[in-house]
Image (cartoon, grey):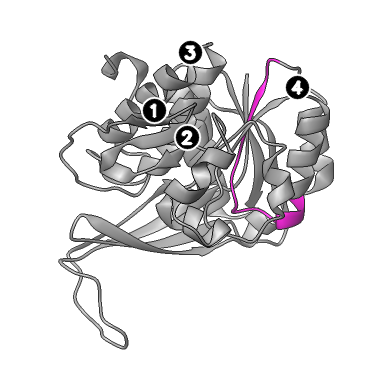
Amino acid sequence: MIYVIGSMSVDLVVQANRLPKKGETILGDAFFMTEGGKGANQAVSAARLGANVYMVGCVGDDNFGEMIVTNMKANKVNVEYIEKIDDCASGTAHITLADNDNSIIVVPSANSEVSIELVDEALNSMDQDSIILLQNEIPKSIIEYVIEESYKKKITTIYNPAPFIEINPELLKKVTYFTPNETEVKAMFGEEFNDVIEKYPKQMIVTLGEQGATYFDSELINIPGMKAEVIDTTGAGDTFNGALAVGISEGMSLNDAVQFANQAAALSVGGLGAQGGMPYRHEIK
């Protein structure tokens, strides 16, 4: 059982041939809306790969909230621990796609309302075979609470520290795995990943985009990425984390789980939207 404790949002996406400069207005090529949020993305990724997934988080009492919950159900994600917050908007992400890259502004709204009470409901239903997936788009106090409680209960936790926030480094010792990218490592530690990864053997898994991922196990282990035709990179990191959780939940070795996650992430960039290209299990060889 995988429990994703995190954000859910609607992505408002603009496609353009380039990103605007400061103070500049440019014409876009297309606009569309799709479901997103790092938590929701990771939940959908894991569910499409065959896992039994519970989403834990909050939506607003608006049309976007209904859209988010409907999408969770359509992807066979259990919605028992999704709470609707009255008189509150659902989270949104404002995304510009250009030159095979993206820029994103996130407005948390209902995602800021995730409470200890809601988290405790989910925690009380877990056992030591459960896995928690956690990210940084919900309140910092909740992130810290989840890490502390899951450590006490000896529940496997995968912490994706994105987007970057400052967090007590001592807490990192209490998560089973954490999955920053190179930029997040630099922000967290003030060092390049090569200078810090040995301090977290088989725990820190650094994602490197199209170059794959790396971790330390007596030596630096590099798992190369797969070549892929890039349409939209928005949900690649979330796909990786969802797939990693699936691999670990199925008892794969860390090496095999990272390879599995790399494959899923590479396939995900071939579709539009954070979830549009996320693969199903039969697509991974």
In space, the residues marked 2 and 4 are separated at their CA atoms by 20 Å
Is residue 168 something that shows in the picture?
A: yes
In space, the residues marked 1 and 2 are separated at their CA atoms by 7 Å
49 is higher (above) or lower (below) than 278: above
> Dot 4 lies on which element?
loop
Tell me which numbered mark, 3 or 1, is placed earlier along the sequence: 3
Residue 220 on image: x %, y %: 41, 33
Closest to the observer, 266 or 95: 266
Which numbered mark, 3 or 4, is in the foreground of this view? 3
Q: How many marks?
A: 4
Give the amino acid at mark 2.
Asn
Give the amino acid at mark 3.
Met
Closest to the observer, 242 or 204: 204
Tell me which numbered mark, 1 or 4, is placed earlier along the sequence: 4
Residue 227 on image: x %, y %: 17, 34
Residue that badge 4 annotates: 126
Residue 21 on image: x %, y %: 26, 81
Q: Residue at x 31, y 36 (%)?
A: 212
Give the amino acid at mark 1.
Ala
Residue that badge 1 annotates: 261
In space, the residues marked 3 and 1 are separated at their CA atoms by 11 Å
Tell me which numbered mark, 3 or 2, is placed earlier along the sequence: 2
Q: Is mark 1 in CB contact (under 8 Å) with mark 2?
A: yes
The magenta stretch is 129-143
Magenta-drawn stretch contains 138: yes
Query: Neighbour class for label 4 at 10 Å: few (<14), some, many (≥20)?
Result: some
Question: Is 269 displayed left or right of 171 in the figure?
Answer: left
Question: Is 128 displayed left or right of 94 in the figure?
Answer: right
In space, the residues marked 1 and 4 are separated at their CA atoms by 24 Å
Residue 234 on image: x %, y %: 34, 49
Residue that badge 3 annotates: 252
